[in-house]
Image: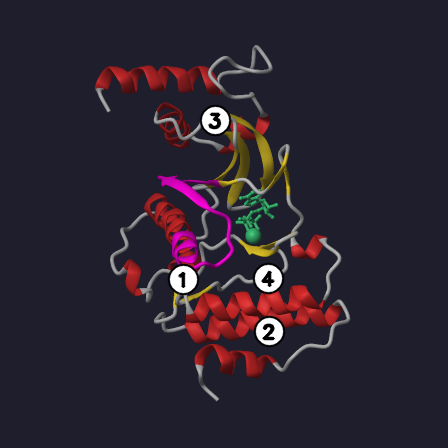
Amino acid sequence: MSDSFKAKLEEKIDTLLAPPRKKIRKDGFKKSKVINEVLDKSTMMTLYKMINSGTLHYVNGVIRAGKESVLFWAVDKQGRDIALKIYLVTTSNFKKRASYIIGDPRFSRIKKGTRSMVETWARKEFRNLNQCVQNGIPCVIPITVSSNVLAMEFLGVKGVPTKTLVESVIDYDDYKDAISLILRLYRKARLVHADFSEYNLFKTEKGLIVFDLASAVDIRHPNAKEFLKRDINNITRFFVRRGLTVQNPLNIFARATNEF
Ligand SMILES: Nc1ncnc2c1ncn2[C@@H]1O[C@H](COP(=O)(O)OP(=O)(O)OP(=O)(O)O)[C@@H](O)[C@H]1O
Ligand SMILES: [Mg+2]
């Protein structure tokens, strides 16, 4: 990036962070409290780079503000909805994340510092999603990742996300689908989700779609099997609570790993 270009960007960011004068600003952002409070200058720079490179046209609004990430609804040049997952640097849980990165042979070197950990985390989610796509596993389609911002396909209508499994009426097909996802993740994509739950699955007409894959590890991670057991137990508990008759979780673990 040239110096003059950078200066222009910085100037734009300063305007953006200043108190609102108009509701919708001509630079592509609707001013909002969340944008003001959670997005630091460097994240704003990343968003502007995405706008300038054509990934983004404008940012519409917040889908959901979590503790460690904020989901935005944005639109690309062709008018298609996209979802931006912005990982927050300020509330990053460094230690917890490290335990899902160290030991994964795909990420042998990690740099020190919270910001670089958050960026690794965002890249890890992008890489995991790509690994799913390459192996035919139904997941949200990743578009690109830059610093702490992950851009992906938006699942939903007019800024309202598709319902997750926990928000849906469920049946036995959902159970079969969920187990099949765990098995295919392990056996085909060579991944363990490590946060597989009713909160991280969209229920669509075509079946379940998995998302939120930042914590997913390569099956060679020393704790992969422990995470796999936890994933199977968590999702089993959900279906039992909803009144379904389920298989023994140990059998599912055995089917995934061939360990009886
Ligand atoms: N690609 C997407 N399209 C539409 N909505 C999405 C998409 N990805 C995430 N969301 C919405 O944002 C919510 C949070 O996303 P996600 O689970 O990836 O973040 P998270 O890190 O788990 O957040 P939290 O820390 O609050 O649990 C989802 O429940 C969903 O409603
Ligand atoms: Mg989640």
Label 4 CB sits under 8 Å from any ligand 2 atom: yes
Residue placed furthest toward the right: 243
* Residue 148 visible somewhere in the drawing: no
Which of label 3 and label 1 is nearer to you?
Answer: 3
Res. 78 mark: 3
Residue placed furthest toward the top: 21
Res. 233 mark: 2
Which of label 4 and label 3 is nearer to you?
Answer: 3
Res. 111 mark: none
Specify whether residue 32 is painted magenta. Answer: no
Comes first in the chain, label 4 or label 3: 3
* Amino acid type, label 4: Ser
- Assess whether mark 2 and mark 4 are in contact (beta carbons under 8 angstroms): no
Q: Quarter of the image for the N terminus: give it.
A: top left
Comes first in the chain, label 4 or label 2: 4
- Assess whether mark 1 and mark 2 are in contact (beta carbons under 8 angstroms): no
Q: Which residue is mark 1?
A: 100
Badge 1 marks a residue whose secondary structure is loop
